[in-house]
Amino acid sequence: MVLIVRWILFTLAIIFVAWLVPGINVDNFQSAMLITVIMALINIFIRPLIVFITLPINILTLGLFTLVINALLFMLAGYVAPGVEIDGFLAAFLGSVVLAFLGLIINMVTIPGED
């Protein structure tokens, strides 16, 4: 049940990011749900490999290169998902930063902590 709630909350977060950041367009709720699934799959299978390969650059930049990786993977998800358009790197960068912040809030709300 928690997984479905998180999926819907992340979908709403993507719709909010599309509303907030110029250059990101999501056609409908189904497109937002699909890009949520695509981003989850990218974060599970592709992101760890890319972070490992770029580890030296990430160490030199004190972790700030992770923001670039997140933006590029967000652009990839937007390219793969039908009904989603991301108009450039700056839009993807701003969208990924806002989405990461919203994801932090969603994780704090939905993942039960230790009491």
Image (cartoon, helix red, strand yellow):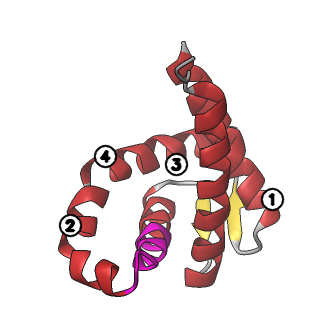
Residue at image point 61% right, 46% down: 104
The residue carrying pointer 3 sits among few (fewer than 14), some (14 to 19) or many (20 or more) residues within 10 Å by Cα, namely many
Q: CA distance from mark 2 to mark 1?
A: 33 Å
* Residue at (42% x, 71% y) in the render: 66
Amino acid on which the number 1 mark rests in the picture: Trp
Residue 67 in the image: x percent, y percent? 49, 73
98 is higher (above) or lower (below) than 13: below
Label 2 environment density (alpha carbons within 10 Å; few <14, some 14–19, many ≥20): few
The first of marks 3 and 2 along the sequence is 3
Q: Which percent across, then down, holds residue 95?
A: 64, 66
Left or right position of 47 against 90: left
Q: Gap in Å between the C-alphas at discs 3 and 2?
A: 24 Å
Residue at mark 1: 19
Say what amino acid the circle numbered 2 marks: Phe
The one nearer the camera, 59 or 40, is 59
Q: Magenta residues, as a range?
A: 61-72
Reading the chain from its start, which is encountered first: label 3 or label 4? 3
Secondary structure state at the residue bearing disc 1 = helix
Q: Which residue lies most toward the top here? A: 1
- Between label 2 and label 4, give the one nearer the viewer: 2
Which residue sits furthest right? 20
Q: Is residue 65 visible?
A: yes
Residue 35's label in the rendered image is 3
* Helix, strand or loop at mark 2: helix
The span from disc 2 to disc 4 (Cα, nearest Å) is: 13 Å
In space, the residues marked 3 and 4 are separated at their CA atoms by 14 Å
On residue 44, which mark appears?
A: 4
Labels 1, 4: front one = 4
Question: Residue shown at 67%/49% (left/top)?
Answer: 102
N-term-proximal mark, 2 vs 4: 4
Give the residue type at disc 4. Answer: Ile
